[in-house]
Image (spheres, rainbow, N blue to C red):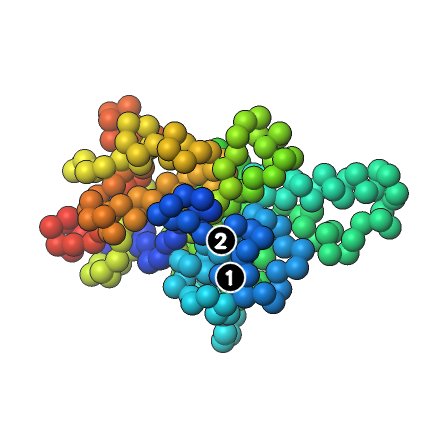
Amino acid sequence: MTGRARETRLLLTGWSLHLPGIAEFDGAPPEKAATVLGRKGLLYKEPSTRLALCAVHRALGYEPGQRATGPIETGTAVVACSNLGNVETVAKVTRAVEAEGGRAVSVLDAPNVSPNVVASTVALWFGFGGPNLMLCSGSTAGLAGLRMASLLLRSGRATRVVLVGAEPEDEIASILHDGPLRSGSACAILEPWRENAGHVVVDVDPVAPAPRRTVGPGGFDVKERWGDFYGAHGVVELALAAHLAVTEGEGRVGIGPRRPDGGPLVTVTEHSDEMGYR
């Protein structure tokens, strides 16, 4: 393994796009998440949490209603990206406290006030016992999540990272976003790069050759075509790039924004001899 490969490449061993209302990647809306996850345990779960659970479920290749079994996976970390995932509950609880005091808050609502609720619920639901992080850093949260996943893997803090992004489409979130917000989720499962792994490669600091297609401005612009997924946007782009690279046979797909020299900051490539990864 070369030094550059160790620093810049990751394996993408699973991915999913769970985007209600978008034909090719249509998925159950939050109120129908039981069709994917099964009914048990969904009571009082946030819409964004339900969407995130669905995306991870699909990325893991689970059958509808299948649940995780076996011991806790201490090497699997969760990095979740969502800026407005629980704001509706925060507003609801705040109003209840203001009107009637703390005793008016439901014990089932209270845990959802935590900003980490999406990441922690994913970890508990699937039995992931590694580091558990929530990123709420605006429209770049998804790409920040990819960098965080890379750090966790390179430092040995995790042997696998489940990167998931989800945003709701409720009234409070849309007001705070100051514009239309698209409900949806996506997931990418990442591992340290190793030679001859036979998986999809994510390069976070790529060099030539140039990609065949680009996800972002000048290529398949997710925001223009589908809408703004805000905090989940970067994860949606990453999962879409994997789909285009593998399922649609594009081979190498870049993810914007581009560097000043015209190259993409991130590429997703189907692993093969011709692409120089062996």
The picture places residue 48, in percent across and down from the top left corner, at 56, 47
> Closer to the camera, 166 or 30?
30
Q: Answer whether residue 65 is visible to the viewer in this image.
A: yes
- Total numbered labels: 2
> For this view, does 274 lie left or right of residue 9?
left
Q: Tell me how far mark 1 sits from mark 2, CA to CA.
A: 7 Å
Identified at 56% across, 39% down, the residue is 169
Q: Nearer the viewer, residue 58 or 158?
A: 58
Residue at position x 35%, y 57% from top? Answer: 14
Query: Looking at the figure, which quarter contains the N terminus?
Result: bottom left
**Marked residue nearer the N-terminal end (1 or 2):** 2
Q: Position of residue 27 (x, y in %)?
A: 45, 52
Image x and y of residue 102, in percent: 85, 47
- Give the residue at mark 1: 35
Instruction: Work out whether 258 lies above or below 148.
Output: above
Q: Residues within 10 Å of mark 2 (few under 14, many from 20)?
A: some
Could you tell me residue 50's position as x and y percent?
A: 56, 54
Name the residue furthest top. Answer: 260
| Residue type at the position of mark 2 | Ala
Q: Is residue 178 above or below residue 241?
A: above
